[in-house]
Amino acid sequence: MSGFEQHVEAPDRRWQYLLFAAEPYETISFKIPSREVDKSEGKFWTYYNTETKQFFLQFAFKLESNKYSGDHSSSSSRSYGPVPPAPPGSLRS
């Protein structure tokens, strides 16, 4: 949800809201930076454990150009470490 769709705080283009809704609970939201989400393989996944009724979501933001440091080298040469492991009991291979 964009910062302009919510009516709790003053609209701010720098933020967006990640919402979770599940009956019978109230909807909850997390305020996250308004950046593009990287949906490539290994960077975005969801899993719902039907036995424990737990929902897992993992995502990463796309890397932005290095606009703050004056270093304009390719961001693809940087290493940010491996993708975190999947939660216990997940079906991820």
Image: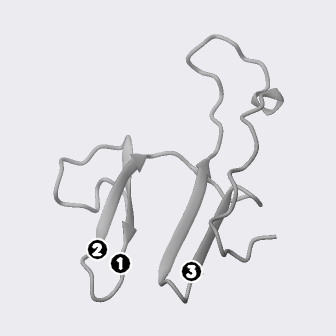
On screen, residue 63 versus residue 24, left or right, reads: right
Residue farthest along the top direction in this orientation = 70
**Residues at badges 1 and 2 in contact (C-beta under 8 Å)?**
yes
Instruction: Tell me the kind of residue under disc 2.
Output: Thr
Vertical placement of 48 versus 31: above or below? Answer: below
- x, y percentage for residue 7? 18, 60
**Residues at badges 3 and 1 in contact (C-beta under 8 Å)?**
no
Vertical placement of 28 versus 66: above or below? Answer: below
Q: Picture quarter containing residue 13?
A: top left
Q: Secondary structure at mark 2?
A: loop
- In three-dimensional space, the C-alpha distance between marks 3 and 1, rounded to whole angstroms, equals 14 Å
Q: Residues within 10 Å of mark 2 (few under 14, many from 20)?
A: few
Residue position marked by numbered label 3 in the rendering: 48
On screen, residue 39 versus residue 48, left or right, reads: right
On screen, residue 82 versus residue 61, left or right, reads: right
Residue position marked by numbered label 2 in the rendering: 27
**Which image quadrant: the N terminus?**
bottom left
Residue position marked by numbered label 1 in the rendering: 21
Instruction: Tell me the kind of residue under disc 3.
Output: Tyr
